[in-house]
Image (tube, helix red, strand yellow):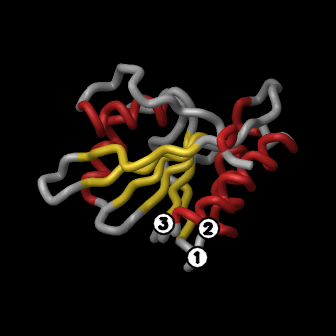
Amino acid sequence: MKLYLVQHAKAEVKDGETSRTLTEEGVAELLKVASFLKIHAMVSIHTIYHSNKIRAIQTAEILFEHIKPKPLVKQASGLAPMDDVLIWAEQASHLSEDSMIVGHMPHISKLTHQLLANSKSGNFVSVRNAGVICLERDSTDQWSLRWSIIPEILK
């Protein structure tokens, strides 16, 4: 089972944490990543989970348009920037189909570390706006890093 962890694309900077929308640059970078996933990574996802923040919703919607067959898109609790990563570490252990989580820093980074090293801290996987980290859970319920993609390396 694969789990794709995505930090939302670049968003405008303004007061009102929930209402920040993606910038033009953020959308352009995300479209590069989404196209790559569609053409080269052959990603097949059952569900995209996202937080209730507009920037995560917009990111999930753009990814939804590029992933075939169309996944379910669901707003989920426990994905805000400062939420406890153990909530989703536990939920991920029960997922049976390939899924994607669109979230925020530092939550996505901490969740990655929790799944890979059973620790909320560490800096062995870099997370970036519009970047995707692909983790895979094996038959012993251990997670490993399959690959990671960031917009800067795509044409």
Q: Hey, what amino acid is under mark 2?
A: Lys
The residue at which mark 3 appears reads as 47
Going 68% across and 43% down the picture, which residue do you hit?
151
Label number found at residue 68: 1
Q: Is residue 45 above or below residue 109?
A: below
Is 13 in front, or is 41? Answer: 41
On the image, the x and y values in percent for residue 63 come to 65, 60
SS class of the residue under badge 1? Answer: loop
**Of marks 2 and 3, which one's residue comes earlier in the chain?**
2
Residue 2 appears in which quarter of the rendering? bottom left
The answer to whether the residue labelled 1 contacts the one labelled 2, judged by CB atoms less than 8 Å apart, is yes
Frontmost of labels 1 and 2 is: 2
Going 49% across and 51% down the picture, which residue do you hit?
101
The residue at which mark 2 appears reads as 38
Which residue sits furthest left?
Answer: 140
On the image, the x and y values in percent for residue 47 come to 48, 66
SS class of the residue under badge 3? Answer: strand
On the image, the x and y values in percent for residue 40 come to 57, 64
SS class of the residue under badge 2? Answer: helix
On the image, the x and y values in percent for residue 36 come to 64, 59
Q: Hey, what amino acid is under mark 1?
A: Lys
Frontmost of labels 2 and 3 is: 2
Going 51% across and 27% down the picture, which residue do you hit?
106
